[in-house]
Image (cartoon, rainbow, N blue to C red):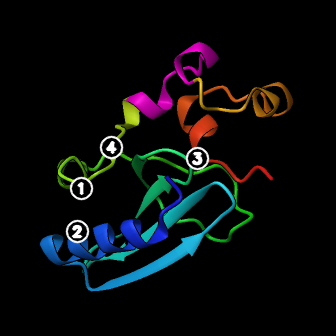
């Protein structure tokens, strides 16, 4: 689901509903990132580029950053569940990766990168 326009619209609506004070978008080869700033925190919504999965994470420092750090954020996850995306919880993302459960992850990426968690397999900086 490489539709940046839909993701941007979803994030702007989410920002309005949750009173974010600033919205910034970043694009990586494998996922889109929307950084939402609030009075007390800055948080990222990430969406896979190939399928409609989203998650809540700490914002990346750069596009070549280490793996994402996913966080539990019940309020944002609840909001994301009313969007066209499937919002994955921290527990789902931190679960061991089993290729047979995620057939859309490329076998060549699995063989080369050896992802250990679902989050690492879905949201990564692989080329």
Disc 1/disc 4 C-alpha distance (Å)? 9 Å
Q: Are marks 3 and 4 in contact (CB under 8 Å)?
A: no
Q: Quadrant of residue 60?
A: bottom right
The span shown in magenta is 92-102
Disc 2/disc 3 C-alpha distance (Å)? 20 Å
Disc 3/disc 1 C-alpha distance (Å)? 18 Å
Direction from residue 57 to residue 88 in the image, left or right: left
Residue at 49% over, 52% down: 1
- Disc 4 marks which residue? 87
Closer to the chain start, of discs 1 and 2, is 2
Q: Is residue 124 above or below residue 118?
A: below
Residue 43 location in percent, x, y? 38, 65
Q: Are marks 1 and 2 in contact (CB under 8 Å)?
A: yes
Q: Are marks 2 and 4 in contact (CB under 8 Å)?
A: no
Is residue 43 in view?
no
Residue at 63% over, 35% down: 121
Disc 3/disc 4 C-alpha distance (Å)? 13 Å
Q: Of helix, strand and loop, which one carries label 1? A: helix
Q: Of helix, strand and loop, which one carries label 2? A: helix
- Disc 2 marks which residue? 14
Q: Is residue 101 above or below residue 62?
A: above
């Amino acid at each position: 689901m490489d539709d940046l326009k839909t993701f941007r619209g979803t994030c702007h609506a989410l920002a309005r509903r949750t009173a974010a004070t600033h919205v910034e978008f970043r694009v990586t080869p494998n996922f889109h990132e929307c950084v939402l700033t609030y009075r007390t925190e800055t948080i990222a919504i990430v969406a896979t580029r190939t399928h409609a999965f989203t998650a809540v994470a700490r914002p990346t420092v750069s596009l070549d950053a280490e793996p994402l750090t996913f966080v539990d954020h019940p309020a944002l996850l609840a909001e994301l569940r009313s969007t066209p995306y499937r919002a994955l919880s921290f527990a789902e993302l931190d679960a061991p990766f089993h290729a047979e459960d995620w057939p859309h992850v490329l076998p060549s990426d699995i063989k080369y990168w050896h992802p250990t968690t679902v989050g690492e397999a879905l949201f990564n900086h692989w080329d």
